[in-house]
Image (spheres, rainbow, N blue to C red):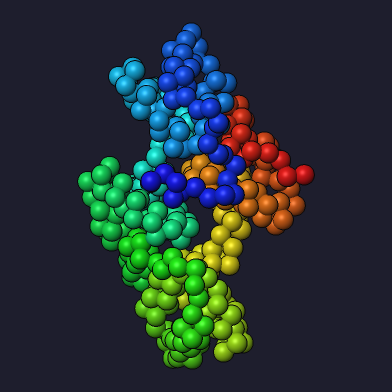
Amino acid sequence: MASVWVGHRGTIRDYPGFSPSVDAEAVRKAIRGIGTDEKTLISILTERSNAQRQLIAKEYQAAYEKELKDDLKGDLSGNFKYIMVALVTPPAVFDAKQLKKSMKGTGTDEDTLIEILTTRTSRQIKEISQAYYTVFKKSLGDDISSETSGDFRKALLTLADGRRDESLKVDEHLAKKDAQVLYNAGENKWGTDEDQFTEILCLRSFPQLKLTFDEYKNISQKDIEDSIKGELSGHFEDLLLAIVHCVRNTPAFLAERLHQSLKGAGTDEFTLNRIMVSRSEIDLLDIRHEFKKYYGYSLYSAIKSDTSGDYEITLSKICGGDDE
């Protein structure tokens, strides 16, 4: 199951000559010794793939009758603790917990909901939904329903169903038809038919939408982004713009999220950790490339100047290198 999460543009790969029992023992020593050996923890956990880390955790549990994540929580602190725990969490469980956290307490973190639900594949979303139910005994849909409203809620629920078409084949006739439907639902209408936007943008495949957006421009002489900005508003508008951005270039969308999390006063570690950990085996190399292209400096240097200590060392290792 693990392999469906893995892309070819990650910074972290399977470690050759991997031995879960050797690693589990080394990790145990690093935690149990006098003072924690952070260096060993970092080098083991950032140089193994998530699937391998799960095997270390299993071995750890079997050998010491303790959960690795609990021992890490008990032994580490601050941002360093959060990122190390994130590294040993299965991807679907990690995303489920991030979604829960973004809906907990007062106020909802809509940007996080949008980011996760627009950048994960249908298969990933199905796994996240299962994990969500297993961990929280509530369905993801129920929580989204009670924390959001209106067209935004409708669109999030459509995405959370994991029904987006994943095929790479594109249908030119459908693209022309969808483009016309979008045009009729927005620019060409008094008032907007939001449901049509949700239906098309939340269910069609990314390659299909790319073609639809080209056709849309032919019909309306406008970019789809401009129409969305002109016709819609609020979190619903943010969500649809995020989908368009991801269709055009998902790594660029995530590079922008990382840039926001690192710039200005205070770092948004919640977002920083999530993107670095969740994309480390998928497209972090591409995200790094887009970051450098857009901002003129590397993600690596941004991490170095914005974080410190063991936390910085861990993030730098996940980042995997500088882009001169």
Q: Quadrant of the C terminus?
A: top right
Query: For the image shown, how many numbered marks are present on the structure?
Result: 0
Report the front residue among 242 and 63.
63
User: Left or right of 104: which side holds 204?
Assistant: right
Question: In front: 55, or 108?
Answer: 55
Which residue is drawn at the image coordinates 55% and 73% (left, top)?
210
Which of these two is toward me, 177 or 295? Answer: 177
Occupied quadrant, residue 318 = top right
The residue most toward the left is: 137
Q: Is residue 124 above or below residue 188?
A: above
* Residue 285 sits above or below residue 169 on the image: above
Answer yes or no: is residue 121 visible.
Answer: yes
Q: Residue at x 58, y 67 (%)?
A: 248
Q: Residue 139: x and y, percent? A: 25, 53
| Residue name at image x 43 percent, y 12 percent | 32
Q: Residue furthest top?
A: 34
| Vertical placement of residue 212 versus 69, above or below | below
The quadrant where residue 166 appears: bottom left
Q: Nearer the viewer, residue 221 or 128?
A: 128
Residue drawn at (47%, 22%), measured in percent from left and top? Answer: 23
Residue 239 image position (x, y, % from top left): 46, 66
Q: Is residue 179 visible?
A: no
Residue 292 at x, y percent in the picture: 71, 51
